[in-house]
């Protein structure tokens, strides 16, 4: 296992929007993060997407408060020109997912937690849903 996890937007939104049936797995994952069993990372793209969704589905104040709380638990990694160019020429179909992948890879994070595992067809990184990852810990 690893102590570094890259967290994708869908997992964060599961918690923040209380999305059933996924919220319980995401909450359990974050319990491990809060207990400092794992260090969580994400990208500015994820933070921006989470803010956008929360501000549309809730309101701007809720979105800003939620992002502030997230920033206490998750380190935001840089996305620079190198990562953006790698994502641009990547064989991954979704440009945004490619940014997440290369952001994690560039920071030597071997595990990416997402519910969109089919978007990440890679063999050099563990891609898992929160539920799959938690089951691996047993």
Image (cartoon, rainbow, N blue to C red):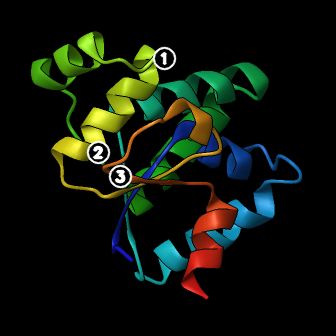
Q: Which mark is residue 125?
A: 3
Q: CA distance from mark 1 to mark 2?
A: 16 Å
Q: Residue furthest right?
A: 20
Q: Are marks 3 and 2 in contact (CB under 8 Å)?
A: yes
The residue that mark 2 highlights is: 104
Residue 32, position as x, y percentages in the image = 53, 78
Going 67% across and 30% down the picture, which residue do you hit?
54
> Viewer-nearest of labels 1 and 3?
3
Question: In the rendered view, does 90 fall on the left or right side of 27?
Answer: left
Residue 39, position as x, y percentages in the image = 35, 68
Quarter holding the C terminus? bottom right
Of label 3 and label 2, which has the lower sequence position? Answer: 2
Q: CA distance from mark 3 to mark 2?
A: 9 Å
Question: In the rendered view, does 83 fall on the left or right side of 57?
Answer: left
Q: Which mark is residue 94?
A: 1
Q: Which mark is residue 124?
A: none
Which element carries disc 1, helix, strand or loop? loop
Of label 1 and label 2, which has the lower sequence position? Answer: 1
């Amino acid at each position: 296992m690893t102590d570094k996890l890259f967290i994708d937007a869908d997992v964060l939104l599961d918690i923040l929007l209380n999305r059933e049936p996924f919220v319980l797995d995401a909450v359990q994952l974050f319990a491990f993060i809060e207990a400092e069993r794992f260090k969580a990372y994400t990208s500015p793209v994820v933070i921006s997407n989470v803010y956008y969704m929360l501000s549309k589905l809730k309101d701007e104040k809720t979105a800003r408060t939620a992002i502030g709380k997230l920033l206490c638990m998750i380190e935001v990694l840089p996305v620079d020109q190198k990562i953006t160019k790698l994502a641009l020429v990547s064989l991954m179909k979704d440009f945004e997912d490619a940014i997440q992948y290369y952001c994690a890879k560039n920071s030597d994070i071997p595990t990416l937690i997402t519910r969109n595992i089919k978007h990440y067809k890679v063999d050099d990184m563990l891609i898992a849903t929160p539920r799959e990852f938690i089951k691996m810990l047993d």
